[in-house]
Amino acid sequence: MNRLQKIALFAAIASAMAAPAFAQNSATVTGTTGTTKIVAPITLAQDAPLAFGTVVKPTSGNSVITVGAGVGGVASVTSGNAAVVGASGRAHYNVTGETGMGFTISTTSLTMTRISGTETLPVTLVKSAATGTIAAGVADFGVGGSFTVASDTVSGDYTGTFNVTVAYN
Amino acid sequence: MTRRVWTVTSLALLAFCTASAARAQAPAYTTTTATTTIRDAGGIKTVGEVIFQDIVIAPSVTIGSVLNSSEGSASFTVLGSDAVSMSVPESFEMARQGGVETLTVQTSAGGDYSAIANLQSMLSASGTLSIDVGGSIRVSADQLAPGEYRGLLVVMAQYN
C-alpha cells in the first residue's frame, strides 16, 4: 500500500465514521397506528326473475308495459291499449354481508329476443334503489323495467338476461 | 445484495397481486332472466242478436217459450291466438220500451267457459271461435204488459 492508497483508505474510514453523526439529526415519531377493518364478504342471490307476463299487443299504435321495481311490482300498461294477463313480477334479490356496510347496485342492459326468432324488445331497467345498507346482515332490493310493444310486434315468447352486481361502497 | 433486492421486490409484487385479487372478489353479481309473451290482440264480435218471436198471450194462460233456432240465437265470433275464457250470464233482463216492465231471459249457454279445457282446441286455425247464445222466457198473461222488450246481453271473452 503506497502513500496515496493509505490516504484514500483513511478518507473512507473518516467518511464512514461521520455518517452516524448525521443519523443523530433525524426525528422519530412513536405510536403511529395501523388499522384495518375486516368485514364479511358481500353476497347476492336472486329469488325471483323479471316477468312481464303475457302481453296482448295493442290493436294500433304502441303501448308501454311496465313492471315496477318496488314491493309488489307487477306488469301494467302505462300507455296505449295493450293488455297484460297472467303472472308477472319484478326481479328480487337478497344481499348478505357486514351489518352497517353500504353497497351500490348496478345492472347491465337488457334486450329480450323472441325464442326461435330474431326480433328483439329492448328493456329499460329500473332499480328500487341505487344503493343500500346491510341491516342485521341482510338487505334486499328489486329490479323492474319497461318496454314498448307495437301492434306489429311479432307474437311469441321473448326472453333475455342481464347481470346485477352489488359492491361495498 | 442484488438477489435480496429482487427477492424483496418479488415478495412486494406478490403481496400487491394478492391484495388486488382480494379486491376483485369483493363485488357479488348474479344473472337474471327476463321473459314475456306477446299475443295478438283478441276481440269479440257480435254477429247476430237474440230475437224472440212475437208472443201472443191468451188470458190466464202461462206460456213457456224456448228459442233454439239459429235465427233467434245471438251469435258471436271470438278472435284470438291462444286459450281464451268466455263468460256468458245465466240470465239477463229485457225492459219494455216506453215502460218499466221487465222480462228475465234464461240463456242457453250461460256459465263460465274458462273451465272448459278444450275451448282452446275449439279455436280454428284462423284464431276464431263462433258461439251461439239462445235463451228462453217464461211469461204469464197477468204479469206481462204487451209491447216491445229489449235488453242487453253481455258476453265477455279474455285470454287465460
Image (tube, coloured by chain):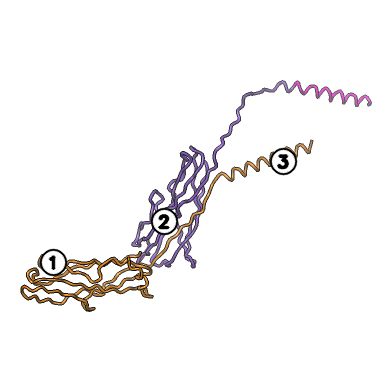
Chain colours: A purple, B orange
Q: Along the line of sight, which residue is nearer the eye, A151 or B8?
A: B8
Helix or strand or loop: what does disc 1 sit on? Answer: strand
Q: Is residue B88 left or right of residue A159?
A: left
Per the model, the C-alpha gap separating discs 2 and 1 is 49 Å
Does residue A59 belong to the magenta stretch?
A: no
Per the model, the C-alpha gap separating discs 1 and 3 is 99 Å
Query: What span is colored magenta in the figure?
Result: A2-21
Secondary structure mainly formed by the magenta segment? helix
- Report the disc number at residue A42: none
Helix or strand or loop: what does disc 2 sit on? Answer: strand
Residue bearing the label numbered 2: A146
Amino acid tagged 2: Ser
Residue A81 locus on image (x, y percent): 33, 62
Residue drawn 75% across and 37% down?
Answer: B5
Residue bearing the label numbered 1: B102
Amino acid tagged 3: Ser
**Both labels 2 and 1 in a single chain:** no
Per the model, the C-alpha gap separating discs 3 and 2 is 52 Å
Kindly report which numbered mark, 2 or 1, lies closer to the viewer in this rendering.
1
- Name the chain under label 1: B
Quadrant location, the N terminus of chain A = top right
**Contact (CB < 8 A) between labels 2 and 1?**
no
Q: Is residue B29 left or right of residue B88?
A: right
Kindly report which numbered mark, 1 or 3, lies closer to the viewer in this rendering.
1
- Name the chain under label 3: B
State the count of labels.
3
Q: Along the line of sight, which residue is nearer the eye, B86 or A115?
A: B86
Q: Quadrant of residue B22?
A: top right
- Report the disc number at residue B10: 3
